[in-house]
Amino acid sequence: MSQNTPQAKSPAAAEAPMASSVLTRLMDRLSEGVGAFCGLATLGMVLIISYEVVCRYLFNSPTSWVTEYSLYIFVSTSFLATAYAHLKDSHIRVEILLNNISTSARHKLWQVSAWVGLMFVVVAAWQMTLFVGSEYQGGARAWGLLATPLWIPETPVAVGLGLFALAVLGEARKLSPGVGPRREFMGMTLLVAMIVALLFMGLKPPSVAGTSLDWGTVSVVVAVLVLAWLWNGVAVAAGAALLALGGGVLFAWAADFSTLAQGAVMAFYLLSLMVLGVRIAFSLGMVGALGVLFLLPTPQLQVIAERAWTGVNSFAFTAVPMFILMGAFLLRSGVTSDLFGVMLKWLGRFPGGIAHATVGACGIFAAVSGSSLATAATMGMTACPEMTQRGYSPRLTYGVVAAGGTLGILIPPSIAMIIYGSLVGEPISALFIAGIIPGVFLMGSFMLVVFGWSFIRPGAAPRGAHHTWGDKFRSLTGVLPFLVLIVGVLGSLYAGVATPTEAGALGALIAAGLCFLKKKMTLKLLMESVMETAKVTSFLIFIVAAASVMGYAFDYIRLPKVLVAVVDGANLAPGLVITILIVIYMVLGMFIDPISMMLMTLSVSFPIVTALGLHPIWFGVVLVMMIEIGLITPPVGVILFILKGMGEDIPLKEIVYGVLPFVAVFLANIALFYFFPSLIMWLPNQMAGGL
């Protein structure tokens, strides 16, 4: 799963002057309340899906309402919690530039980023409101057995986006400490006037003669820029105008370009926004919004609302919060520290034994969290002190933890695979099972590196304490329920007994049971777990929705088809194409989180790879591996910096030297799976029904 642990505040966030006002305090309290509601609603979804499983398998009496209701709960909570996720700093951004400029310049870019994001979210909320109004007016109903009027489940999406806009406005206000009550009041009055103007325009805002714009969009952009001027001055307002209006001019100029040139313009604008610190979801959304405004024959801004609904309105996505909640409960149950202790007793006596134990614990922990960053952070806190105290070299210590962290989204369950399967139409259970053998191969390869390192430099990896066989077997009792849970979840998927969503729901309930057994379950732990689930799910799904808008623009200008034709015409060998993709993903992975990177590139890379005759399941696993390499690739792999933050006295170059052998092994495994694809495809082909 993408990130099951609260994200650390960025350096820029920590240093930026913050202001408190009635608006910011109100938004903080409102978002906390909505976050709690969404978390509890997610728990309710777990319960009704588990109820469906019991009714179907024990009483042969399946329900007719659970699937539809759980989907509506998922979509509603995903958007309602966007404000909570934003104010918890979960909507991520690229900080490679922000962390290398002065504090004042960094703060200015944060302000510009907030205003650009506000433009997109206000437009999205407005378009979603129009979309709900048109659905109500047209009497549209869902295709399900319940034939639900669509405006009912769509309304929370519009409300959620509206709250999100207020949260972004609250962030902008916090970043504006010098604003007095008079200017704050003028700004809020301006926003109220903008809302009244949008309502007055109705469901079909009038067009601006001779342009691709309508007066509603113009009203939003003007109001936000004037507000930026009122609160932050001319420089920040000019910066926001340059990014937004300059982007519009750039796209309008590119309207008559070739498809490849238009794709290059979109990629340039996207990368520019991200480098300047605009949050990734906003960057994707801005590219999509400008694309549908200026690159299509007729402007189709309503695509933002349509894709916000249809892009995530898939039952397959409901598995996302299930596995996130399962991981949240297990992380808080204390089973993860028990797990490392067990691995230490079984493997600690071997040469490099604690490092072997770390790799094994990372692999099993990955089956809980599914997050590479969470795996690296958790094992870094547990294993790094243990190894350094025992005399392990810093290079081996931090290198093996960084490498073990990459197992996070490869070994199932994996949020990345859920999103990939949902977007390309491949069975998620098959993707989960396909990741098992590659995950085991990587674990074995990492252990071989440790063994070789210990053999060549025995002083770098002293042996651990000796434990009797009795101690070893007694240690298993602490984690046996955890292992039974993992085997049960994956076994039910392999046998075709349960869908990924159902397996995740049952896993979440069993994980909650483990918390009770260990006497860790409290009301505070429960609320922390469900609110964290709502937060992580929300920021992931909003990125999916924003990427869906951008993907629509890509598809409309036929960029994927043109690129496939170019690759086809160049007669490139499949191996060369995969090598090029590996290089691209390694570079992107230095700056961008795995899920965002996958969503940014999938609409282009997937058609190219499948046109070469490579199986989508195989590519799903290899794609996950490619995006993970970037997290440990020097000089700016994210996991490297997470570990550097934990070992402040360890030079970054020592961590880089330590991780390089594991990067080489990672690449060797991708080559192995390319030449022997059956290593990935064998288990999925053995599943009930096959592929």
Image: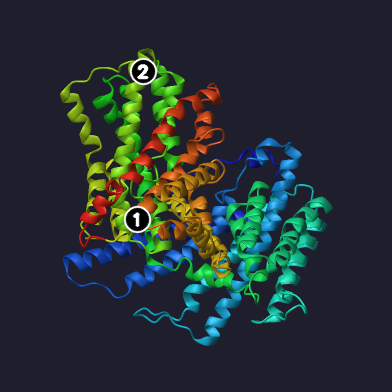
Horizontally, residue 643 falls left or right of residue 109, namely left
The CA distance from mark 2 to mark 1 is: 38 Å
Disc 2: which residue: 461
| Residue 133 shows in this picture | yes
Rendered location of residue 638, percent (x, y) = 52, 38
Q: Which mark is residue 649?
A: none
Write the residue at 34% across / 15% down.
462
Write the residue at 57% across / 63% down.
550
Horizontally, residue 61 falls left or right of residue 48, namely left
- Between 287 and 149, the residue placed more toward the observer is 287
Residue 455 position by quadrant: top left
Q: Which mark is residue 617?
A: 1
Q: Nearer the viewer, mark 2 or mark 1?
A: 1
- Between 181 and 374, the residue placed more toward the observer is 374
Residue 484 position by quadrant: top left
Secondary element type, mark 2: loop
Amino acid type indicated by mark 2: Ala
